[in-house]
Amino acid sequence: MPQAAAPQPAIVQPGQYPNLNIAPQPAATQLTEVEKQALTSELRARRTAQAAEAPGASATSNSAALRRLGATHAQDALKVIEGN
């Protein structure tokens, strides 16, 4: 007795259209509105904390050090080149 072939998914069968009336199943569990709000508030708190770390204060001290280095670098380089 010949065995019947297993039915193929509708998408693979040429010449046929998929049934759009069947709701697709999600691949993963969806976030609830409460979980979404909790994650959003956590991310906003992290963003605020990161912005409050004030990178400007260290940039000011770095710029002063770089200005001192720039002022003396040319003189030091010439001393090395001339062998003084």
Image (cartoon, grey):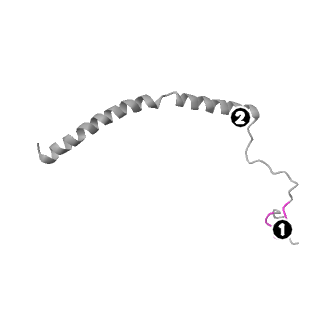
Left or right: 75 with respect to 8? left
Which of 47 and 14 lies nearest the eye of the viewer? 47
Q: Estimate how packed mark 2 is, as few (under 14), some (14 to 19) or many (20 or more) residues with alpha carbons within 10 Å.
A: few
Magenta span of residues: 11-18
- Residue 54: in magenta span: no
Which of 23 and 42 lies nearest the eye of the viewer? 42
| Quarter of the figure with residue 83 | top left
Determine whether the residue tagged by mark 2 lies in a helix, strand or loop.
Answer: helix
How many numbered marks are there?
A: 2
- The residue depicted at 80 percent of the width and 63 percent of the height is 11
Residue to which mark 1 is pinned:
5
Left or right: 26 with respect to 53? right
Rounded to the nearest whole Å, what is the CA distance between mark 2 and mark 1?
45 Å
Residue to which mark 2 is pinned:
36
Sequence-first tag of 2 and 1: 1
**For residue 22, above or below residue 40:** below
Q: Quadrant of the N terminus?
A: bottom right
| Quarter of the figure with residue 28 | top right
Left or right: 39 with respect to 69? right
- The residue depicted at 73 percent of the width and 38 percent of the height is 31
Q: Main secondary structure of the magenta part?
A: loop
